[in-house]
Image (cartoon, rainbow, N blue to C red):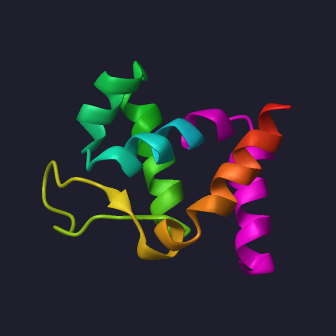
Amino acid sequence: MSAALRHLLWYLIAGTRGGPNRARIVVALRGRPYNAHQLSEALGLDYRTVRHHLDLLEKNGLVTRPAGDAYAAPYVLSTYLETNYAAFEEIQSKARE
């Protein structure tokens, strides 16, 4: 795992107030693809909150939309995050301590 990814995950997951919700989104997307509305329902979060976190995760290359920007297109974990998922789990567990 690169140092850049480690720093990015620490910032996005452990270093900001929205980190726990971003972590929940990542865990949910590892299970299956979701669109923003489905995630808001599954996680019990406001739709706009979910959109904000998805936009941030997408901007940083951690999630992607294989169908593009089509309405209700699902999100999935990027290959980059999927390949380095153990690093995410490590940082997530340390953030909870």
As for residue 93 lying within the magenta part, the answer is: no
Range of the magenta residues? 1-22
Query: Is residue 3 found left or right of 25 in the rendered image?
Result: right
Quarter-of-image position of residue 9: bottom right
Is residue 54 depicted above or below 44 in this figure? below
x and y percent of residue 63 in the render? Answer: 42, 62
Q: Is residue 89 left or right of residue 76?
A: right
In the image, residue 22 above or below residue 30: above
* Rendered image quadrant of residue 73: bottom left
Q: For this view, does 38 lie left or right of residue 51?
A: left
Total tally of numbered discs in the picture: 0
- Left or right of 97 in this view: 37: left
Indicate the position of residue 45 as horizontal and vertical percent values. 43, 23
Which residue: 42% across, 69% down?
78
Residue at the (50%, 75%) spot, across then down: 80
Judged from this view, the residue extending furthest toward the right is 97
* Residue 6 within the magenta-colored segment of the rendering: yes
Rendered location of residue 60, percent (x, y): 56, 68
> Majority secondary structure of the magenta segment?
helix
Q: Quadrant of the N terminus?
A: bottom right
* In the depicted structure, whether residue 43 falls above or below residue 62: above
Between residue 18 and residue 31, name the one nearer to us: 31
Q: Residue at x 40, y 18 (%)?
A: 44
Outermost residue, bottom direction?
2
Residue situated furthest top in the rendering: 44
Residue 69: % across, % down: 21, 64
Compared with residue 48, is residue 70 higher up or lower down, i.e. above or below? below
Q: Residue at image x 72%, y 65%?
A: 8
Split into 4 quadrants, where in the image is the C terminus?
top right
